[in-house]
Amino acid sequence: MLFEPRSGRLAAWGNALLAGLVSPDEAAMSIVGEDAVHRVEGLAGESGPVGLTLALGRLRALGVSGLRVALPAPGHPLGLSGPPEFNARALEAEEAVVAVGAAVGLVPEVAEAGPAGDVHVSVTWHCLPVREAPPADVPSLGEAERELAEALREATTVLTRLDVAGSGPMADAALSAYRARAEAGREALAPGYPPRAVRVLALAQRVDLMVSLAYESGHGGAVAASEMAARTEALRPVERVARRALVAAYNSAVEAREQR
């Protein structure tokens, strides 16, 4: 399964809306995707949760000119700028959106209901104050692309040697699904993003898929404790680089506008 964080969809289509490239309804529908409903809670001037279309309009009225993604992990506050309360909520959710032009951020809370095969997913975005400061550890697109290519080569060498690169029927099915989705012309990012961002996002998603398959395949040939430790050591930096690349891709529309 491809890793497509909800914060990425919100930032990408929110940026397209703020740039005047899509309508509010198109942006809201694209953000919701296959979920049942998204609501935003805690917006200034609103006494309760509101729909995405209204929320995006409110954010623009507050002075928001762009949206950035944060994908923090323990020990790595990627994309965050504080305060500690917001960082803690974002770390718990493993993702967040930070506004540009207003000191607010959005953290998703996901709820699922219904039987297997008919699960309805609802998302509540909690709007919280953030510190207006540069986000932590976010690379440029060029840096992210170079890091990703290097990490992928190194990890593939180690994982292949340990026989845990993610082979077999499960891996083949996942990779086939990845190729089919790419060939179907799925719009990886919203209008307004540079082609390089689309390329970096696709590579980061492919790397994330490889890492997931390596973990899900069990120990493979890495039966010795030292070999299992080597696999973990090989995967950890790749995961970190992939997350950095995802953030760089989603944030590139804002970075490009600021450079102009």
Image: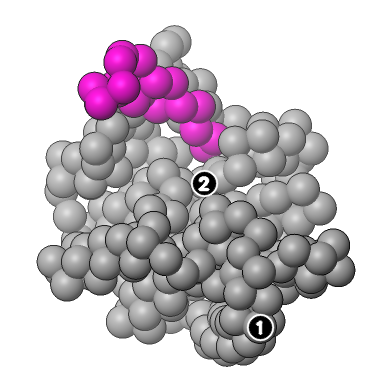
The CA distance from mark 2 to mark 1 is 39 Å
Badge 1 crowding class, 10 Å Cα cut-off, few under 14, some 14 to 19, many 20 or more, is some
The secondary structure making up most of the magenta span is strand
What's the amino acid at mark 1?
Arg
Task: Tell me the residue at 41%/39% (across/down).
Answer: 59
Task: Tell me the residue at 61%/55% (across/down).
Answer: 218
- Where, quadrant-wise, is the C terminus in this rendering? bottom left
Task: Tell me the residue at 23%/46% (across/down).
Answer: 30
The residue tagged 1 is 161
Mark 2, secondary structure of its residue: strand
Considering only vertical position in the picture, is 160 above or below 114?
A: below
The residue tagged 2 is 97
Q: Which residues are magenta?
A: 106-124
Considering only vertical position in the picture, is 84 above or below 198?
A: above
**Residue 198 image-quadrant placement:** bottom left
Residue 40 visible in the current orientation: no
